[in-house]
Image (tube, grey):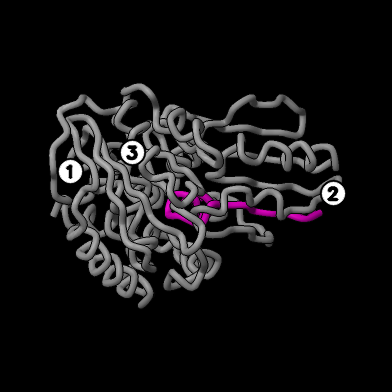
Amino acid sequence: MRHIDVVNGDADGICALHQLRLAHPLASELVTGLKHEIALLERVGAAAGDHVTVLDLSLARNRAALDRLLESGAAVTWFDHHYAGNVPHHPRLDMHLDPTGRRCTSELVDHHLGGRFRAWAVVGAFGDGLGDAAHRLAAPLGLDARQLARLRGLGESLNYNAYGAAEGDVQAAPAAVYRLVSRYAEPFAFIDGEPLVARLDAGRVADMALAAQVPALHASTGARVFVLPDAPWSRRVSGLFANRCVAEDPARAQALVPLPGRGFNVSVRSPAGRAPAASDFCRGFPGGGGRATAAGIERLEAGGSAAFVAAFEAAYGVHETRVEASPK
């Protein structure tokens, strides 16, 4: 019998899996990748008696691979908070889904485990840009402001490290990061014990300083669009920059990040409760999807940015276009 863990390589995915394996240690095979590598289940082969655990990956983007695994006789456990589409019912499928956008995958696992490793769920929520959820999770832990700031920094740095067109863009491959995290029962020991954390922090701060100098390409009272330059730093910082924009200006935020020779990779953030949801908007484009308040388009063709800006303004803007600088 094989155990296979398939996980998004960002902060939420890593922290969700780490909680599970702290509670249920297993000699499992790890399948992970950078943030944009969503269809990870396609890489998995399994047979009758095998068990596959999937965390922080869209069911809608992996449905064909899931059907194949179930037909092979494998059992699958799934935790996720992205748009799921039509959810199948199967005796060997155990689903834990919340596509509302209010809870990240780390919080779903935290709930499943009764809060046993809550601090890691806080890190995952901070990394996923869900500050309110992170503070709600942290409330019973009695952490002071400095401790919360350290968990926020760790979450943002782990998430920052998952963004890039290829592993050469990031400081450490997600699989290597998870192996380091897996050595520590609590996040403060990880922060103090691994030099990688300080390197990620320094890189995150430097790249965010560069992003802060990029003015908005388009800004109205309801929508903003940023086009970051084609550079490794901009690909690394795209998710964090989008989260920071919407945190500092809750009305809207958008970043377009060029991928060399392949057009743009798009990150969309929409305010909670505002229609259309970010996931709904992005599914209007090929390769688009995500969750209610944070979604993306895997590939927007080169030359398609003007049409995207028009569609984004039509969906979220409130007319009255103005020039606006990037938040500092």
Horizontal and vertical percent position of residue 232: 39, 68
> What residue does disc 2 label?
47
Horizontal and vertical percent position of residue 86: 64, 24
Q: Is residue 91 above or below residue 158?
A: above
Q: CA distance from mark 1 to mark 2?
A: 48 Å
> What residue does disc 3 label?
309
> What residue does disc 1 label?
248
Kind of residue indicated by mark 3: Val
Horizontal and vertical percent position of residue 149: 21, 55
Q: Which span of residues is magenta-colored?
A: 1-19
**Sooner in the amino-acid sequence: mark 1 or mark 2:** 2
- The residue shown at (49%, 48%) is 301
Q: Is residue 163 magenta?
A: no
Within-10-Å neighbours for mark 2: few <14, some 14–19, many 20+: some
In terms of depth relative to the viewer, which is nearer, 24 or 317?
Answer: 317
The quadrant of the picture occupied by the N terminus is: bottom right
